[in-house]
Image: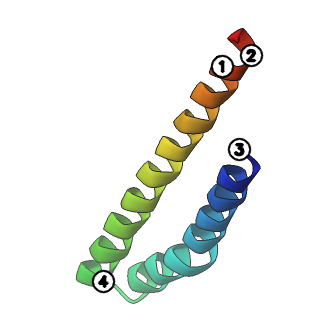
Amino acid sequence: MASLGVAMVAIFMYIRFSLYKKLSRAVTESEWDAGCAAYAQIRTWISINLGLGVVVLLVTLLRWTA
């Protein structure tokens, strides 16, 4: 579970400090195609992070009831 938590933090850092910067730059420069591409990557990584969070929750619930 701790390794999944570390992976989730790493994904968040990647989104915040890399992909969000690309999105901001694209919006500032009115490069809408690049902005859409960055936004699509952000959505993909957020979905992965959400899935990992659900896995952590399920593992926690299964360990709590057992």
Q: Secondary structure at mark 1?
A: helix
Q: Nearer the viewer, mark 4 or mark 1?
A: 1
Question: Where does label 4 land, which residue?
Answer: 34
Q: Secondary structure at mark 2?
A: helix
Q: Secondary structure at mark 4?
A: helix
Q: Is residue 54 left or right of residue 4?
A: left
Q: Is residue 39 left or right of residue 32?
A: right
The reply to whether callout 3 and callout 4 are in contact (CB within 8 Å) is no
The reply to whether callout 2 and callout 1 are in contact (CB within 8 Å) is yes
Q: How many marks?
A: 4
Q: Nearer the viewer, mark 4 or mark 2?
A: 2
Q: Amino acid at mark 2?
A: Trp
Q: Amino acid at mark 3?
A: Met
Mark 2 burial class by Cα count in 10 Å: few <14, some 14-19, many 20+ = few
Q: Secondary structure at mark 3?
A: loop
Mark 4 burial class by Cα count in 10 Å: few <14, some 14-19, many 20+ = some
Residue sitting farthest toward the front: 66
Q: Earlier in the sequence, mark 1 or mark 3?
A: 3
In whole angstroms, how far apart are the C-alphas of marks 3 and 4? 35 Å
Image location of residue 7, percent across then percent down:
64, 60
Image location of residue 13, percent across then percent down:
66, 69
Q: Earlier in the sequence, mark 4 or mark 2?
A: 4
Question: Where does label 3 land, which residue?
Answer: 1
Q: Nearer the viewer, mark 3 or mark 4?
A: 3
In which quadrant of the rendered view does residue 33 lie? bottom left
